[in-house]
C-alpha cells in the first residue's frame, strides 16, 4: 500500500510541475540547455521538506537524460549538466553539486558531495590568456551501484560498484569495484572482498 501511495504522489507532483517543466523546455530550446537547467536547479533546490523532494523528482525525471521517479534529491542540491543519469533508489544528500555523471542504482551521496564533470574542465597551460578563456572538456563520470559517498567528497573520476568513499575524499583516479576509498588524493585503503 505504501508503494502505491508513493507512486501516486510522484505522479501528482509530476503533474503539478508540468507547467514549470514546459516553460523549461521552451527556454532550453532558445538558450543554452545547461545554463537553463542550472537556473531552474537553483530555484527548485529551495523547496523544503518531503514535498520539495517529490516536486524536484517530478521535474528532473523529464529534464535530465534519466532520473528515476523515486530518486531523492534533497534540499539545496544543484545540477549543472542535463546529461545526467540518476538510477532507481539513489539518494542525493543536502547541498550536493552534481555535474555530468551517471549514478547507479541504490547509491547514496552524503551532504555536500561534489560530482564534477571530470578533472579537465579548465585548461590553464597558456600563461598569456585568462584561465576562464582557455576552455576545457567535460567527461561523464560514472558512479556504480550500491555505493556510499561520505559528506564533502569530491568526485572527478569513475567509481566502481559497491564502493565506500570516505568523507572529504578527493577522487581523481578511477576506482575499482568493492573498494573502500579515502584521502586526498583518494586511494584504495581496503577491498570489501577481503
Image: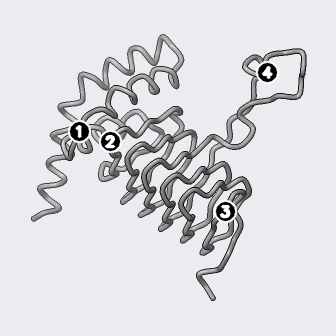
Q: CA distance from mark 4 to mark 2?
A: 33 Å
Q: Are marks 4 and 2 in contact (CB under 8 Å)?
A: no
Q: Are marks 4 and 3 in contact (CB under 8 Å)?
A: no
Q: CA distance from mark 1 to mark 4?
A: 38 Å
Any mark on residue 134, and which? 4
Name the residue beneath numbered marker 1. 48
The secondary element bearing badge 4 is classed as loop
Name the residue beneath numbered marker 2. 75
Q: Is residue 157 left or right of residue 102?
A: right
Viewer-nearest of discs 1 and 4: 1
Name the residue beneath numbered marker 3. 183
Q: Are marks 1 and 4 in contact (CB under 8 Å)?
A: no
Which mark is first along the chain, 2 or 1?
1
Q: For mark 3, does the 10 Å Cα neighbourhood hold few (<14), some (14 to 19), or many (20 or more) residues?
A: some
Residue 145 higher or lower than 170, as above or below: below
How many numbered tags mark residues here?
A: 4
Which mark is first along the chain, 3 or 1?
1
Which mark is first along the chain, 2 or 3?
2
Q: Are marks 1 and 2 in contact (CB under 8 Å)?
A: yes
> The N terminus appears in which quarter of the rendering?
bottom left
Q: CA distance from mark 1 to mark 2?
A: 6 Å
Residue 34 higher or lower than 6, as above or below: above
Which mark is first along the chain, 3 or 4?
4
In the image, residue 191 lies at what x, y percent? Answer: 64, 80
Q: CA distance from mark 3 to mark 2?
A: 27 Å
Which mark is first along the chain, 2 or 4?
2
Q: CA distance from mark 1 to mark 3?
A: 33 Å
Amino acid at each position: 500500500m505504501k508503494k502505491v501511495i508513493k507512486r501516486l504522489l510522484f505522479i501528482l507532483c509530476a503533474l503539478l510541475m508540468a507547467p514549470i517543466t514546459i516553460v523549461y523546455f521552451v527556454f532550453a530550446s532558445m538558450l543554452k540547455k545547461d545554463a537553463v537547467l542550472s537556473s531552474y536547479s537553483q530555484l527548485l533546490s529551495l523547496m523544503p521538506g518531503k514535498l520539495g523532494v517529490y516536486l524536484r523528482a517530478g521535474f528532473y525525471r523529464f529534464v535530465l537524460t534519466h532520473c528515476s521517479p523515486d530518486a531523492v534529491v534533497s534540499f539545496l542540491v544543484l545540477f549543472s549538466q542535463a546529461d545526467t543519469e540518476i538510477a532507481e533508489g539513489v539518494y542525493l544528500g543536502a547541498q550536493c553539486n552534481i555535474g555530468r555523471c551517471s549514478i547507479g542504482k541504490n547509491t547514496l551521496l552524503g551532504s555536500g558531495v561534489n560530482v564534477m564533470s571530470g578533472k579537465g574542465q579548465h585548461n590553464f597551460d597558456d600563461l598569456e590568456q585568462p584561465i576562464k578563456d582557455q576552455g576545457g572538456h567535460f567527461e561523464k563520470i560514472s558512479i556504480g551501484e550500491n555505493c556510499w559517498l561520505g559528506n564533502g567528497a569530491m568526485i572527478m573520476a569513475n567509481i566502481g560498484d559497491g564502493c565506500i568513499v570516505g568523507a572529504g575524499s578527493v577522487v581523481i583516479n578511477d576506482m575499482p569495484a568493492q573498494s573502500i576509498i579515502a584521502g586526498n588524493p583518494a586511494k584504495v585503503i581496503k577491498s570489501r572482498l577481503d
